[in-house]
Image (tube, rainbow, N blue to C red):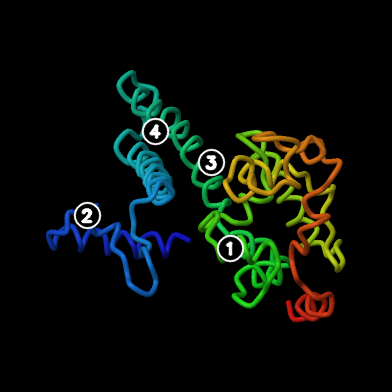
Amino acid sequence: MTEDVYTRLFQYLVGSLAGNGGIAYAGQIDPVQGVLPRWGTTLDWAITMTIALCVLILVGILLSRVLFQGRQTDGDVLWFHLLTLGVMPLFLLVVGNFAVLEYAKEERNCSGCHLALKAYVEDMQNTKSDSLAALHFQHRFAPGTSCYSCHTNYGVHGSVSAKIAGLGHALKYVSGRYQFPLNISSPYSNIFCLKCHHGAKRFMARDEHLDGPGKVSTSLVDDKTRCLDCHRVAHRVEREAQASRRTME
């Protein structure tokens, strides 16, 4: 993760020195690959600030040992200790957690930490697949955060709940306490679909989605009729492929 960030940071700085103004360079577009990933995203800044704060704290501790040895309790030195061991760690706690939560939204994190999900991510990225995950990915509904967007509920509570569940998944993978085919822990609620599709032109144009003009069907809202009852399949991953992948891992 950090290698990508600092490769793009170097490119960003070179672009700035070359007179591209940094910001324009960060939005450079390639005719084939589209918008090129350049340093400067919120996540890039968060990672950089996290590492910088860690370095400053370590430097502060070393300076305290070298410059203030034998007088760590002096009045002026205590202020230095308060800054190094009190204020900066508080900022580190906030910025570091933000960086982790932001990075956890990215698709590469899902297949990087949850190795058992590689087959699902590969299906999503497969241009020939007709699964719901692949179609959403191909139509760029949530660029870079497809897994997170479709499997996480609203707000901070949704993010925290997803991360707690993710830790449980990682624990099961490490301990080998899982089996194929993987099953979702609870029925997939329509709210994950409606949070994006409710109000969308194509969705609202279908009579089967509505109880009347502009009113989404209560059976969909109340989960009495599930989106997945008609729109199948979420992930097109063969059981045999999953089993062989697990053996290779």
Considering every residue shown, the one lying at the far left of the view is 19
Would you name the residue on which mark 4 appears?
Answer: 84
Would you name the residue on which mark 2 appears?
Answer: 22
| Element assignment for label 2 | loop
Q: Amino acid at mark 2?
A: Gly
Separation of marks 4 and 1 at Cα, in angstroms: 45 Å
- Viewer-side residue, 19 vs 69: 19
Please provide percent x and percent y for residue 54: 42, 45
Separation of marks 4 and 2 at Cα, in angstroms: 32 Å
* Mark positioned earlier in the residue sequence (1 or 3): 3
Task: Name the residue at 86% across, 61% down.
Answer: 177
Separation of marks 3 and 2 at Cα, in angstroms: 27 Å
Please provide percent x and percent y for residue 240: 83, 80
Q: Amino acid at mark 4?
A: Thr
- Viewer-side residue, 113 vs 157: 157
Q: Amino acid at mark 1?
A: Phe
Which mark is drawn over residue 58? Answer: none
- Viewer-side residue, 212 vs 18: 212
27 is higher (above) or lower (below) than 63 = below
> Considering the image in quadrants, where does the C terminus appear?
bottom right
| Element assignment for label 4 | helix
Would you name the residue on which mark 1 appears?
Answer: 137
Left or right position of 140 against 224: left
Q: Amino acid at mark 3?
A: Asn
Would you name the residue on which mark 3 appears?
Answer: 97
- Where on the picture, by quarter, is residue 39? bottom left
